[in-house]
Amino acid sequence: MIELAHFQIVSGALFAVGMYGVLARRSAVLVLMSIELMLNAVNLNLIASAVFIDPSKFTGLIIAIFVITVAAAEVGLALAIVLRLFRSRATINLDEIELMKW
Amino acid sequence: MTENLHLLLPEFLLAALAVVVLAIDLFLPQERKNLLAWLSVAGLAGILALSLPLLWDRDVSLYGGLVEADRYALLFKAVFLVLGMVVILGSADFVKKRLRSPGEFYAIILFAVLAMSVMASAVELLTAYIALELMSFSFYIMVAYGRNNPKSNEAGVKYILIGAFSSAILLYGVSLLYGVVGVTRYAEIEAALAAALTNSDAVSPTLWIGLGLILVGLGFKIAAVPFHMWAPDTYEGAPLPVTAFLSVGSKVAAFALLLRLFGQAFMPAIDQWQILVAVLAAVTMTLGNVVAISQRNFKRLLAYSSIGHVGFMLLGIAALSAIGAEALILYMVGYAVTSMTVFVGLIAFFNVTGRENVSDLNGLADSHPFIAAAIAIGLFSLAGLPFFAGFTIKFYLFTAAATQGLLWLSGLAMFNSLISLYYYLVVVRHMYVDPLPTEAPGTEIAPDTGPGQPRAKPSILITAVLGALVLGVIFVGVYPFPLLEAIKAAVGSLLPLAS
């Protein structure tokens, strides 16, 4: 029998992979993709919870749709800013972006 | 439900105003774009004049409990509308000279103001999240607005990557919380939490992980230590008016959201998260103030000082109760006025000199006495000297924390205020004691100061804004009682049971 906990474990693993990517990758685009992985973990969690915990109202599904939409907007914005950075510095390696120290 | 929708008129009008500004921007010739600043300010003033009588003394829940039109929301709406006017007026000269596409800049400020007012009124997790993201998106764009300035690009990339990362953490926390309680409205979460805590053995660890991740995600947004590493770079790289708006607006709005979330949804579990928030506050205020000592760039110094102030404000969350919430709201308002004074003073200075290091302020008292006096008053107020807003707000906040059993934290906060006095006084020394630099060779000359007229004057507009802010600082410092009345009413609708 598959329960909510199984989904939560998968989603936790996905979230951990995404977080590792954010912390370890040096390319801004790969960091963005890792953030998308984290958001997908969120969606998986929300949808599973909606089905198991809240079957009458499905609030989680609605939140998931909003998360997908906001994530799309976020990536659009982030890529535009990264592109602008690439035009002025010819790199998107986060280790080389150090006019100001982190 | 539907008959009350006119109570959201301020939000609808704000969105419409932003779109109108965007549309008019298309038809205005480049040299007349400044009209848009006046249009935005007039619109904001109109919306403020409309929302005060419309929302006065109301306590209504809208959209089936997604947003609340209460006195708490009205107080913050008024704060954000006034803040929007101050930011637009204070940045008009700067924008005209140094930024391209001013129309979009003002429209994005208006969208940010809209997002902030929704943040203060949202009483449901998804609504609060969407408002938070609208504000964050506006700030991502504004931070990267200095298009050909590599520092601004770099600040934008760092800000949006960290911002998206923190949103993902926040959302994961929300999803875990939802997975346990199955609801997202604050009132229902509060009931579910209270029920779960009565039979304490049955509380799922998932719940605590969820609450912790929500705290971490919001910690990134308010730049609490250890989630603060984006803040100094972003503040330094962003165009100056954006730094001002970011350090004041985004913090006050995030705390408005945080206060509602913790006061209305997480209140039953206060014993569990209080110590966590208290430690976060202690670390944040200490690191912010200590690192600020060694900063040479004024924007970076203010970034660390604002991290220190976030620590003070977290003190108010840790001491959450009727008296703690009142003190925190007063602190936010006083901090907003004070911080804007320093920033508008810095913008005025930057407009005439084009520099932003602390050592560039040498001799400012001789060359521009009014700007120097305003910055000095702002800094004294940030440090918490009497007769200025800073003293009153710190007095109330530290007293409130002490009465809530956080005496050690109040003591630490007072000690940190002393540290902050040191580095603020260093800035004042540069302005008042150190001599005016003689025309050093190789200095870049600001666009409007030819060699023949080295002492350009700040415009009348920014001087007037600065004067009004200084009056505000002194007013809050000497006679805060009308403000306190409004805040008491706001807390009355925020925490109806506690008072």
Image (tube, grey):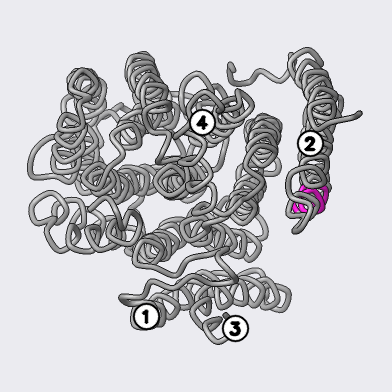
Residue B49, numbered label? 1
Chain for mark 2?
A: A
Mark 1 falls on what kind of element? Answer: helix
Q: Is residue B46 left or right of residue B98?
A: left
The nearer-to-camera label among 2 and 4 is 2
Residue B357, numbered label? none
Distance Cα–Cα, label 3 vs label 2? 33 Å
Q: Is residue B323 left or right of residue B161?
A: left
Q: Which residue is mark 3?
A: B2
Q: Which residue is mark 4?
A: B219
Task: Estimate how packed mark 2 is, as few (under 14), some (14 to 19) or many (20 or more) residues with alpha carbons within 10 Å.
Answer: many
Are dots 3 and 2 on a single chain? Answer: no
Question: What type is the residue that disc 4 sits on?
Answer: Gly
Tell me residue A51's x, y (percent). 82, 46
Task: Estimate how packed mark 1 is, as few (under 14), some (14 to 19) or many (20 or more) residues with alpha carbons within 10 Å.
Answer: few
Q: Is residue A59 magenta?
A: no
Mark 2 falls on what kind of element? Answer: helix
User: Which residue occupies 21% across, 57% down?
Assistant: B472
Distance Cα–Cα, label 4 vs label 1? 34 Å
Say whether disc 3 or disc 1 marks the residue closer to the N-terminus.
3
Say whether disc 3 or disc 4 marks the residue closer to the N-terminus.
3
Question: What type is the residue that disc 2 sits on?
Answer: Asn
Chain for mark 4?
A: B
- The magenta stretch is A63-69
Task: Estimate how packed mark 4 is, as few (under 14), some (14 to 19) or many (20 or more) residues with alpha carbons within 10 Å.
Answer: many
Tell me residue B399's x, y (percent). 14, 34
Q: Which residue is mark 2?
A: A45
